[in-house]
Image (cartoon, coloured by chain):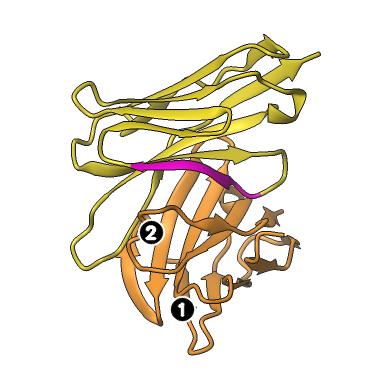
Amino acid sequence: DSGVTQTPKHLITATGQRVTLRCSPRSGDLSVYWYQQSLDQGLQFLIQYYNGEERAKGNILERFSAQQFPDLHSELNLSSLELGDSALYFCASSVGGTGGSGYTFGSGTRLTVV
Amino acid sequence: QKEVEQDPGPLSVPEGAIVSLNCTYSNSAFQYFMWYRQYSRKGPELLMYTYSSGNKEDGRFTAQVDKSSKYISLFIRDSQPSDSATYLCAMSPILTGGGNKLTFGTGTQLKVEL
């Protein structure tokens, strides 16, 4: 157990729907990162939050949004889902904002859009 | 052209062999370099990280960074069947504002056979 908790582990939903993925960082970690992993694109950075504030942004679609709450857990919201959004979504956390010493990943949420 | 290139493999070696995994990159701003190991259906696990150029050793693992050639390597000595996994290189610049976003290679699938 890495200490980063992601729920749910699996999610199957229809096109056009909206889902929320949840992440609890390791105790003491202030930064949360979201990544998408698909077979053809590998691991792609979506967004980072540090202590409730957005710190860095990747190629996150406008249909996707995220936030980090005062208790430091984070949620990734995916709306108007398309078949191509099917992927593994990982959350990671680190103590600081720069993440220079690497970060700890959760076990992921597998999203299937049908 | 991708910012980070990694041979996808698969790479198959006998137990006890020395394994060499490599990545090349194009962004000269990258300062943090990491290697992650990912078992099937699990989150990536940090193996090694280095800042800027040089070598770093941890047990059977050695990471090398050559910034002049934009080339990083991971060596695994005395490889074991339990090392069978996908190995991902990752790197990041130092971002203004203190954020961080890792750019990952697509991963090399390694199989260590008895």
* Magenta stretch: includes residue B49: yes
Q: Which residues are drawn in magenta?
A: B43-50
Picture residue at 47% right of the left edge, 28% below the top: B62
Query: Residue A57: image x %, image y %?
Result: 33, 62
Query: Residue B29: image x %, image y %?
Result: 19, 42
* Pick the front one: A112 or A29: A29
| Badge nearest the viewer, 2 or 1 | 2
Query: Residue B90: image x %, image y %?
Result: 42, 40
* Pick the front one: A15 or A19: A19
Badge 1 is on which residue?
A: A67
Q: Given the image, on which type of amino acid does mark 1 rest? A: Gln
Badge 2 is on which residue?
A: A99
Q: Given the image, on which type of amino acid does mark 2 rest? A: Gly
Shown colour of chain A = orange
Q: Is residue A39 visible?
A: yes
Q: Chain of mark 2?
A: A
Shown colour of chain B = yellow
Which residue lies most toward the bottom here?
A70
* Number of numbered tags placed on the structure image: 2
Characterize the magenta stretch by its predominant secondary structure: strand
Name the quadrant of the N terminus of chain B: top left
Query: Residue A25: image x %, image y %?
Result: 57, 71
* Magenta stretch: includes residue A23: no
| Local SS, label 2 | loop
